[in-house]
Amino acid sequence: MVRDARRRLATAHIPNYAHASAVEASPFADKTFDSMGATLVFGFVVDPMRGFRKIKPVLKPGGTLLLLEPVRAQGALAAGVQDTLVPLTTRLSGNCQAMRKALTSPGLRE
């Protein structure tokens, strides 16, 4: 996936960088990025809050973190359906914990 992303990003009209590593072990220096994006990542992270704590320092002040993550629905019916499907979806997705309750963290805002 990273190889494909790098190939596509090479033609982008803005500076960019694609990297794959464990979010808890980010190799980047503080205040490196204006923005960061993660798609379907945090369902695979054992301690998501630790991952967020590693991301925050590498963003420049006022930087943006863009996430695309499935989370547990707030409505009782939809959440019940999700809860019923969790064992199946977890097994099919390589142990992804996709239907966790949405996380919030001081210093990170929606």
Image: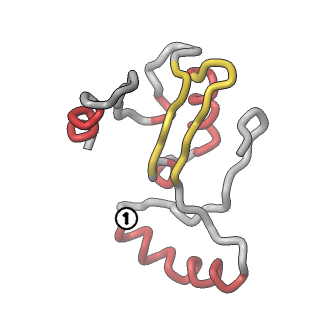
Q: Amino acid at mark 1?
A: Ser
Quadrant into which the N terminus falls: top left
Going 64% across and 31% down the picture, which residue do you hit?
Answer: 53
Q: Please say if 89 is above or below 70.
A: below
Going 35% across and 34% down the picture, which residue do you hit?
Answer: 20
Quadrant into which the C terminus falls: top right
Which class describes the residues within 10 Å of circle 1: few (<14), some (14-19), or many (20+)?
few
Q: Position of residue 27 (x, y in %)?
A: 44, 20
Q: Position of residue 49 (x, y in %)?
A: 64, 41
Q: Nearer the viewer, residue 85 or 14?
A: 14
In the image, farthest residue toward the right: 106
Left or right position of 3 against 82? left
Q: Nearer the viewer, residue 87 or 80?
A: 80
Determine which residue is flagged by label 1: 93
Q: Position of residue 83 (x, y in %)?
A: 59, 78
Left or right position of 45 against 61? left
Q: Please say if 14 is above or below 68.
A: above
Q: Please say if 99 is above or below 61.
A: below
